[in-house]
């Protein structure tokens, strides 16, 4: 009897859809530049992998062409992290750094790309609502996110601009972490002075 139950469980696991299979990530240098490191995704479906990698390369190429090509003396680099690779969601955060000769200080940007690994398509704002109904709630409206941002700033002693009142729209730069918490990224100077740095708001914790 126990053997029959065990065999039934194994069979059930074999036919369940694979919703948590991790992708393989390989670090790659763009155009031979070892300061520009980005991820290359490898999954069984090469067409889907191609879609994902094409979008990643587009972001890398754009940063390279807007910085290194016109300003070869600028110091620029790119690195990445994979905060989420589960439940068919692949989140990639590219960290872009640039220092122009003679500038008062360097600049840093974080660009987030979120993919549905079943299709290779980017997850946009409309896609969030398909992931969970809560993203259509008032908590995730511009007004709701403003409350979360101001609470985060107060708790972390970050001073937002005096004339900052409320977000006008849902930020386009977001990603998921390993706990599937949605993070919203605010770049330097976007809502606070340079000294505040890049603000990474965990919307599930504020």
Image: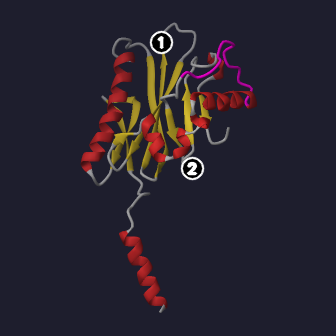
Quadrant in the rendering for residue 62: top left
First to last magenta residue range: 156-168
Q: Which residue is drawn at 33% across and 34% down?
A: 55
The answer to which of 93 and 34 lies nearer the viewer is: 93
Q: Is residue 178 above or below residue 17?
A: above
Determine the residue located farthest toward the bottom in the rendered image: 1
Q: Name the residue under label 2.
A: 179
Quadrant in the rendering for residue 73: top left
Quadrant in the rendering for residue 124: top left
Q: Is residue 104 above or below residue 9?
A: above
The secondary structure type at the circle numbered 1 is loop
The answer to whether 155 appears left or right of 170 in the picture is right
Main SS of the magenta segment?
Answer: loop
Q: Residue at x 60, y 35 (%)?
A: 138
The answer to which of 197 and 127 lies nearer the viewer is: 127
Q: Name the residue under label 1.
A: 100
Q: Where is residue 146 in the image (x, y as percent from the top left)?
A: 63, 27
Q: Can residue 119 be seen in this view?
A: yes
Q: Which residue is drawn at 44% across and 78% down?
A: 9
Q: Where is residue 23 in the image (x, y as percent from the top left)?
A: 39, 51
Q: How many numbered marks are there? A: 2
The secondary structure type at the circle numbered 2 is loop
The answer to whether 190 appears left or right of 112 in the picture is right
């Amino acid at each position: 009897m126990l053997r029959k139950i065990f065999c039934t469980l194994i069979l059930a696991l074999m036919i369940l859809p694979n919703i948590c299979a991790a992708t393989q990530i390989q670090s790659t240098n763009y155009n031979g530049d070892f300061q520009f490191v980005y991820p290359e995704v490898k999954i069984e479906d090469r067409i889907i992998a191609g879609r994902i990698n094409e979008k990643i390369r587009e972001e890398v190429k754009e940063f390279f062409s807007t910085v290194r090509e016109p300003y070869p003396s600028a110091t620029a680099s790119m690195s990445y992290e994979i905060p989420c690779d589960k439940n068919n969601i692949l989140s990639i955060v590219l960290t872009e750094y640039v220092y122009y000769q003679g500038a008062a200080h360097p600049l840093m940007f974080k660009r987030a790309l979120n993919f549905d690994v079943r299709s290779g398509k980017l997850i946009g704002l409309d896609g969030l609502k398909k992931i969970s109904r809560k993203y259509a709630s008032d908590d995730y409206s511009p007004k709701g996110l403003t409350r979360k941002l101001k609470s985060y700033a107060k708790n972390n002693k970050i001073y937002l601009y005096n004339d900052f009142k409320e977000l006008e729209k849902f930020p386009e730069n977001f990603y998921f972490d390993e706990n599937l918490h949605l993070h919203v990224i605010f770049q330097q100077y976007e809502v606070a002075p340079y000294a505040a740095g890049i603000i990474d708001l965990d919307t599930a914790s504020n």
